[in-house]
Image (cartoon, helix red, strand yellow):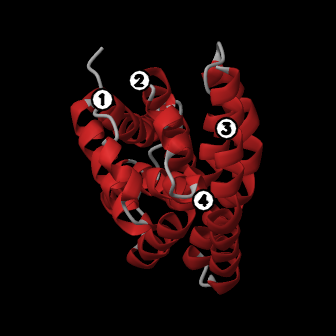
Amino acid sequence: MQRLPRLAPSQAGVPVLPACLALIRRDLLASLRQRQDLFNPLLFFLMVVSLFPLGVSPERSFLQEAGGGILWVAALLATLLSLDHLFRHDFEEGVLEQMLLQPQPLYLLVLAKVFAHWLVTGLPLLLMAPLLGLMLQLDGNSIGVLCLTLLVGTPVLSFVGAIGAALTLGLRSAGILLSLLIIPLYIPVLIFGTGAVMAARDGMPVAPHLALLGAMLVLALTCAPFATAAALRISVSNG
């Protein structure tokens, strides 16, 4: 397996912001080198959305009604597919031990890693959504609301998923256990994300759904890095 670049020892005296930016840059470069980890979730997202009309019904009325849910479920599963590699390569290469020894707060380094994960997973899903929405016969207003919900909701998926990825780090059958832990926590995001698209289709207000998604994002942004940092310390010490 190709080795990932390690954190430079000289980072020990680097301030917090440059260290986080360096970690984001490192993770982005590592994602480009591990192309299978980068493209598998995107191909999965594309195939699920493309095959769903063939397996259920290609009727315009059905696709307009179910399109938002189809895209959100596919985005959720694609994000879940990418979570197993969020910390695993760093754990196997000994990079996580270096992160624990850095003078910068671990939760800020975790925040940087989750942001890098969203850049290579959530952002491409967001960019693909309008084209797939057109394929599912969604109108322009529904596609706009869909993109807005994905913009707010996919970071929540990454932050919550990072907790599960850290808890299952180093375990056998970690992918199955990760799914069992994380999918129930994803359900509220799925409900309100899909609900916003359905409300836009029916001409109803979408602000309540977006407000709840925004509240989830603030809660995840505030609490998830601390929980993930604590889980990483436990997993590394037990590993």
Q: Mark 3 and mark 4 in contact? Answer it, CB < 8 Å.
A: no
x, y percent for residue 57: 50, 41
State the image coordinates of residue 190 (x, y, percent, origin top left): 66, 56
Question: Which residue carries the number 3 mark?
Answer: 233
Q: Nearer the viewer, residue 34 or 209?
A: 34
Please indicate, yes or no, whether residue 235 appears anywhere in the rendered image.
Answer: yes
Question: Which structural element holds mark 4?
Answer: helix
Is there CB contact under 8 Å for labels 3 and 1?
no
* Res. 168 in view: no
Q: Which mark sits nearer the N-terminus, 3 or 1?
A: 1
Q: Secondary structure at mark 2?
A: helix
Labels 3, 4: front one: 3
In the image, residue 74 above or below residue 151? above
**Is disc 2 in contact with disc 3, using a CB cutoff of under 8 Å?**
no
Above or below: residue 198 compared with residue 14? below
Locate residue 106 relative to residue 151 in the image: left or right. right
What's the distance in space between the residues labelled 2 and 3, CA to CA? Answer: 16 Å
Q: Residue at 61%, 69% (x, y): give it.
A: 198
Dot 1 or dot 4: first in sequence order is 1
Q: Amino acid at mark 2?
A: Glu
Q: Earlier in the sequence, mark 3 or mark 4?
A: 4
Separation (CA) of disc 3 from disc 1: 21 Å
Mark closer to the chain start, 2 or 3: 2
Residue identifier under label 2: 93
Q: Amino acid at mark 3?
A: Arg
How far apart marks 2 and 4 lie (CA) works out to 27 Å
Residue type for callout 1: Leu
Of the numbered discs in the image, which one, if any, rests on residue 156?
Answer: 4
Q: Secondary structure at mark 3?
A: helix
Which is more toward the observer, 172 or 16? 16
Q: Earlier in the sequence, mark 2 or mark 4?
A: 2
Comparing 79 with 43, the one in front is 79
